[in-house]
Image (cartoon, rainbow, N blue to C red):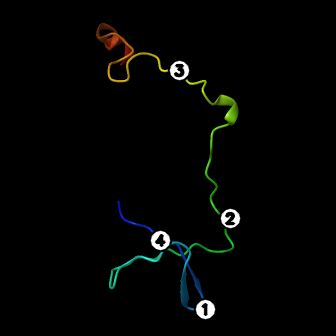
């Protein structure tokens, strides 16, 4: 995975918001996120469902018997 760094550009000057990358020279791709657009919020599951999930069967094998596969098509 490629490393990502957050920065702000103000009056043509770059200010790092995270640790500055330790490179002398690099090819970069810049994506401008408008300050006027709302930031995307991460969705998180409700705390009310914590610990209520259940694993039905083996995670490696199928829940459905092999002879029943034909009826699932």
Query: Are discs 1 and 3 less than 8 Å apart at CB?
Result: no
Coordinates of residue 56 in the picture (x, y in percent): 46, 17
**Towards the viewer: 17 or 60:** 17
**Towards the viewer: 40 or 53:** 53
Spatial distance from mark 2 to mark 4, Cα to Cα? 20 Å
Spatial distance from mark 4 to mark 3, Cα to Cα? 38 Å
**Can you identify the residue that label 2 sits on?**
38
SS for dot 3: loop
Coordinates of residue 7 in the picture (x, y in percent): 54, 77
Coordinates of residue 66 in the picture (x, y in percent): 29, 11
SS for dot 1: loop
- Considering every residue shown, the one lying at the far top of the view is 67
Spatial distance from mark 2 to mark 1, Cα to Cα? 22 Å
Query: Which residue lies at the image location 65% right of the left edge and 29% below the top edge?
Result: 49
Q: Earlier in the sequence, mark 4 or mark 3?
A: 4
Pair 3/2: label in front: 3
**Can you identify the residue that label 1 sits on?**
11
**Can you identify the residue that label 3 sits on?**
54
**Can you identify the residue that label 4 sits on?**
5
Q: Is residue 71 above or below residue 4?
A: above
């Amino acid at each position: 995975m490629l490393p990502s760094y957050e920065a702000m550009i103000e009056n043509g000057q770059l200010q790092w918001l995270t640790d500055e990358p330790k490179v002398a020279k690099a090819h970069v791709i810049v994506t401008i996120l408008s300050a006027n657009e709302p930031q995307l919020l991460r969705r998180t599951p409700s705390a009310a469902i914590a610990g209520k999930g259940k694993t039905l069967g083996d995670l490696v094998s199928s829940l459905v018997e092999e002879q029943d596969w034909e009826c699932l098509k």
